[in-house]
């Protein structure tokens, strides 16, 4: 099992050398046996949603200028008069029709349950995406130490069980809350914004628009991509050694016109390019388990060589003159 440091560990241990850090992590892993491959983020089980401004009604009221609204109403009156409706009844008919539309909208949105739907579909969406990418260890989870009998009693009363419990609170590292409103297209869509508050107070925000039963699937995909994807720096165990993925200058994965430029960029941050075997191993780990997939890109190697994953016969290691590439991907390790 690979052991990884806390995302802020390099800054917290800035006085230590990377060699000392790796040695310390090795001892820690040996002492603790198995450990998470990535740091778990345990969220409070209940997601609170606040209903915001009805953007559909707002669009109806302010989507047109006063003159445009007057012209629309005048056109409706003309159509009623053209069909033979008496002028004294035409205005009353328009008022009744508008009232019916408002009544139908009120009936559709009355009562409770939209927040429960959004929470349930979000959790189901996160599980579905996680099963799709199939990481060795999932990072997102929701705390739930509530006794089963309490859950059953709450469900029988038609409500969620969300009473704070000290055992639950000890596991929680963050919580999520959101807002939703009816989208301005007036086609039954919701505009949903979800805020995830993390242990040190930072907030990550996600947003999507769509049908109520589908919109949270898009947000679930955003969340898994954000929290599960490999972060930099990350400590990786390869055989009997450790390497640290430090990324490239300015970003996690960058490009360079030649292997020499990439190699110099890594040296500038006191790192180096990965070797062929390191590139391959980290690609096997994949983007969801602390590694980096090679894909169909060309990757820079030291000593003016290129890693070409698609041309492995007789070797994926090639000279620049063998590869017609205008840019090479790279990241740095220590």
Image (cartoon, rainbow, N blue to C red):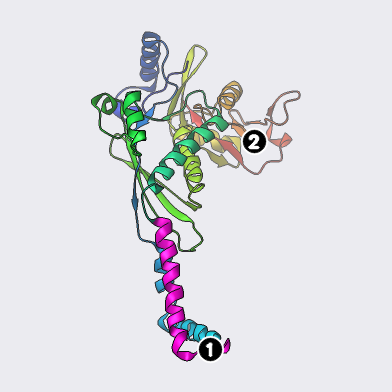
The residue positioned farthest toward the bottom in the image shown: 87
| 187 in relation to 319, above or below | below
Name the residue rendered at 35%, 24% in the picture.
148
| Mark 2 element type | loop
- Determine the secondary structure under disc 1: helix
Residue at numbered disc 1: 81
Q: Is residue 278 left or right of residue 31?
A: right
Prevailing SS of the magenta stretch: helix
Residue located 36% across and 29% down the image: 152
Give the residue displayed 36% in from the left and 9% down from the top.
31
Q: Earlier in the sequence, mark 2 or mark 1?
A: 1
Decide if residue 329 is on the left or right side of residue 142.
right
- 145 relative to 34 in the view: left or right: left
User: Is 107 included in the stretch rendered in magenta?
Assistant: yes
Distance from disc 2 to disc 1, alpha carbons, whole Å, reads 71 Å
Residue 264 is tagged as none
Few, some or many residues within 10 Å of mark 1 (<14, 14–19, 20+): some
Q: Quadrant of residue 17?
A: top left
Q: Answer yes or no: do the residues labelled 2 and 1 have beta carbons within 8 Å?
A: no
Residue 60 drawn at (x, y percent): 43, 71
Quadrant housing residue 9 = top left
Q: Which residue is mark 2?
A: 298
Q: Residue at x 53, y 89 (%)?
A: 81
Measured as percent of width and height from the top left, residue 165 is found at 25, 28
Range covered by the magenta-colored residues:
82-109
Furthest-left residue in this view = 166
Query: For mark 2, does the 10 Å Cα neighbourhood hold few (<14), some (14 to 19), or many (20 or more) residues?
Result: many
Residue 292 picture location, percent across and down: 55, 30
Please name whichever residue, 233 or 209, is drawn nearer the observer in this view of the structure: 209
Q: Nearer the viewer, mark 2 or mark 1?
A: 1
Q: Nearer the viewer, residue 182 or 63?
A: 182
């Amino acid at each position: 099992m690979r052991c990884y440091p806390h995302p802020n560990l390099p800054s917290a241990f800035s006085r230590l050398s990377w060699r000392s850090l790796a040695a310390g992590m090795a001892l820690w892993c040996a002492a603790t046996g198995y450990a998470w491959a990535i740091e778990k983020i345990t969220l409070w089980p209940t997601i609170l949603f606040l209903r915001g401004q009805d953007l559909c009604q707002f669009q109806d009221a302010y989507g047109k200028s006063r003159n445009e609204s007057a012209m629309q109403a005048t056109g409706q009156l003309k159509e009623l008069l053209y069909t033979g409706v008496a002028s004294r009844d035409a205005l009353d008919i328009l008022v009744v029709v508008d009232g019916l539309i408002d009544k139908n909208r009120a009936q559709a949105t009355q009562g409770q349950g939209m927040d429960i739907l959004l929470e349930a579909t979000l959790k189901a969406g996160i599980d579905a995406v996680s099963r799709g990418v199939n990481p060795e260890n999932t990072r997102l989870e929701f705390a739930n130490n509530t006794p089963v009998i309490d859950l059953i009693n709450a469900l029988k009363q038609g409500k969620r069980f969300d009473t704070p419990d000290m055992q639950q609170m000890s596991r929680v590292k963050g919580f999520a809350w959101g807002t939703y409103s009816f989208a301005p297209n007036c086609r039954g869509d919701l505009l949903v914004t979800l805020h995830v508050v993390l242990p040190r107070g930072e907030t990550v925000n996600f947003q999507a628009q769509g049908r109520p039963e589908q919109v949270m699937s898009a947000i679930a995909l955003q969340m898994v991509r954000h929290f599960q994807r490999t972060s930099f720096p990350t400590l990786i165990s390869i055989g009997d050694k450790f390497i640290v993925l430090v990324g490239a200058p300015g970003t996690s994965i960058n490009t360079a016109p030649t292997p020499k430029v990439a190699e110099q960029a890594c040296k500038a941050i006191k790192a180096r390019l990965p070797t062929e075997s390191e590139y391959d191993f980290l690609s096997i780990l994949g983007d969801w388990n602390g590694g980096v997939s090679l894909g169909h890109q060309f990757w820079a190697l030291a000593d003016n060589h290129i890693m070409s994953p698609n041309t492995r016969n007789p070797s994926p290691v090639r000279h620049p003159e063998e590869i017609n590439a205008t840019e090479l991907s790279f990241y740095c390790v220590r």
